[in-house]
Amino acid sequence: MTTAPGILPRQAIQALLDAGVIRSDTPFDIDQVQPASLDLRLSDTAWRVRASFLPGARPVETRIADVAMHRLDLTGGTVLEKGCVYIVRLQERLSLPPGLLARANPKSSTGRVDVFVRLLTDAGAAFDDVAGGYDGPLYLEVAPQTFSILVRPGTRLNQLRLKTGEPPKLETRSVGVDLAGGAGAVVGYRGRRHAGVVDMDRIEGHDPRLFWEPLYAPEGELLLDPGEFYILASREAVEIPVDQAAEMTPIDPSVGEFRVHYAGFFDPGFGVDEAHGAGSKGVLEVRTHDTPFLLEHGQTVARLVYEPLTARPDRLYGEGGSHYQRQGLKLSKHFRDWNG
């Protein structure tokens, strides 16, 4: 494996699985390895906790004992209620060699239903980051915000990116919001507060009208209400070169007091013509803070940071199928087409 700083491509991740650097309680799924990331799966064990936490110098399960309200068995499917915090043990565990680091982020479909997830490791000093040399289990903090969700063992809510050293930041691009729909055109969606449960493994199985309210911006402006969750689209097409990956910053106080894009990973090949994705937009998952905020068409709402891969992946994003390649304004894969 190369020692040049960079994000590992699909074939290198597969080699780590084959070598036992990444292990699992059950056999890996055939589609679990993505072009530059690995999907992680829930196990059957979870805890409802009264507060989020970092484990400090202790194992995660030792810390859970201080804050646990009750233990849950996810076998057969369990509803995780909105407004509550859960810790779920993942099926995968790591035995990273020195110099090989990892970083986790929510999957796109997780962020688009406003489920906040963060990775935890034993004695971890930060969420989502895994230090070189870590040898131990993985856990996921799950906090549904707008909708309650149904999960089970094998449900995939986040993904892991592996990297050698600290890859250089090749470029940082500003991302603007698209509010130029004109009269009668939908520019976004707002989550309904008292909707039903979203089954996280049921693809195109939910009526979007029961969960979302369409939004319009005839004057090119949209007022964000505190505590509400919005799905919007980028003004610009997003393109990730085949030898790079990108991460969208989740919050940037310099552009507004709101959080944009829970799901931060963009895989190599997203939006590129070679992978039949030219013109793809970035979907923005937006939640404002304590103050109402007025967005204007084209206003910068996030930053996209590009980093190199150590090699071109043997499969690009969208090759073999994808719910989000060539997307415009699009809800998560759990919902049927609005007009379908």
Image: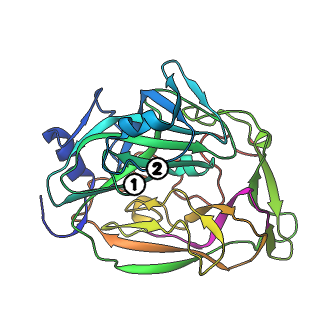
- Residue 158 position within the rendered picture, expressed as x and y whole percent measured from the top left: 44, 46
- In the image, 20: left or right of 334? left
Tell me which amino acid carries mark 1: Asp
Residue in the foreground of this view, choosing between 18 and 41: 41
Q: Is residue 234 magenta?
A: yes
Residue 254, located in which quarter of the rendered image?
bottom right
For mark 2, does the 10 Å Cα neighbourhood hold few (<14), some (14 to 19), or many (20 or more) residues? many
**In this picture, which residue range is highlighted in magenta?**
224-239
Label 1 – label 2 distance at C-alpha: 6 Å
The residue indicated by pointer 1 is 128
Residue at the limit of the structure toward the top, as seen here: 76
Q: Main secondary structure of the magenta part?
A: strand
Residue 150 at least partly seen: yes
Query: Compared with residue 160, is residue 150 higher up or lower down, i.e. above or below?
Result: above
- Could you tell me which residue is drawn at 13 percent across and 41 percent down? 19
The residue indicated by pointer 2 is 118
